[in-house]
Amino acid sequence: MNLQVQGITKHYGENGSCKTVLQDINVEVLGGEFVSLLGPSGCGKTTLLTIIAGFQQPCSGTVLLNGCKVDKPGPDRGVVFQDYALFPWMTVGENILFPMQQQKIPQKLQDEKLHHYLEMARLKGSEHLYPSQISGGMKQRTAVVRALASEPELLLMDEPFGAVDYQMRHNLQEEFEALWQSNPKPVIMVTHDVDEAVYLSDRILVMSTNRGEIVHELLVDIDRPRNRRSNDYHACLNKLTDILKENHKSQS
Ligand SMILES: Nc1ncnc2c1ncn2[C@@H]1O[C@H](COP(=O)(O)OP(=O)(O)O)[C@@H](O)[C@H]1O
Ligand SMILES: [Mg+2]
């Protein structure tokens, strides 16, 4: 897998006004890396992720996935949305099957894969329940395996642990880590949470508060699964917090 984001610029404007949300963004993701886009609310993270997903076009610049230009959504990119976006009228099983049906995968293989993903996400026995009947954690795991079901090259996640309380958030991150280890894929995750970025990422790209740029890149070289109480972990959190403070100060 090779993703190249080259010189992406995005402006939003109406009635003669023009707001620059992304300004010359360049990112490269290779192999099975877990990359986070970290920045405060409104800094353009979702805009960048949706451009990579192909849901909207940049004003200039290109996204290349394995050398091919991205200009629309495709099964090579699995997306987990901020609010999970499960289809409420479909059961857990039907939600997971949906991308496979879109890809017209043979019925027998669909059944095998459904079984595999239900096992992987510990959802066996819940396949006939509707999203309204399951917990936040189960919804999140359903959304992740639905995104994995098209066997994407790249997983794109927008604040996937955002909608729950603090303790649940930690649990979900730990569950996701285990799921990811059992099925490693390159990931780009959007987050505004420093701890989440340090817990999950190999590399963190810090976005500026209001210039639409990537202002810092931090490698997280700590063994997985990470221990949130370790000295290495704390040192990394502190470093990232300092980077964010500096970033905020220089722009206010
Ligand atoms: N479709 C749109 N039209 C106009 N402005 C938008 C649109 N989408 C996002 N914006 C604006 O662009 C900025 C970045 O938004 P977004 O990418 O959602 O940020 P983040 O995900 O980091 O919170 C915000 O100021 C937001 O109001
Ligand atoms: Mg967002």
Image (tube, grey):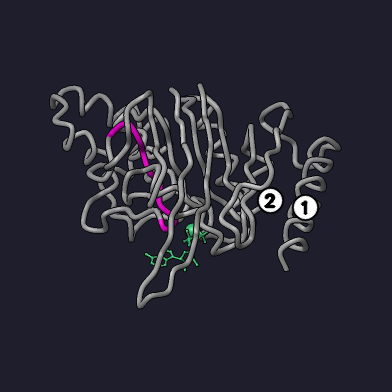
As displayed, is residue 42 above or below residue 78? below
Residue 127, position in %: x, y? 29, 43
- Label 1 secondary element: helix
Judging by the rendered image, the residue that carries numbered circle 1 is 241
On whether residue 80 falls in the magenta region, the answer is yes
Left or right: 222, with 133 as reference point = right
Residue at the (57%, 51%) spot, across then down? 191
- Label 2 secondary element: helix
Judging by the rendered image, the residue that carries numbered circle 2 is 194
As displayed, is residue 219 above or below residue 82? above
User: Residue 156's quadrant in the figure?
Assistant: top left
Labels 2 and 1 touching (C-beta < 8 A): yes
Badge 1 crowding class, 10 Å Cα cut-off, few under 14, some 14 to 19, many 20 or more, is some
Quadrant the C terminus occupies: bottom right
Which segment is the magenta one? Answer: 75-83
Residue 237, position in %: x, y? 77, 46
**Residue 223 disc label:** none
On whether residue 60 falls in the magenta region, the answer is no
Asked if the residue at label 2 sits under 8 Å from ligand 1, the reply is: no
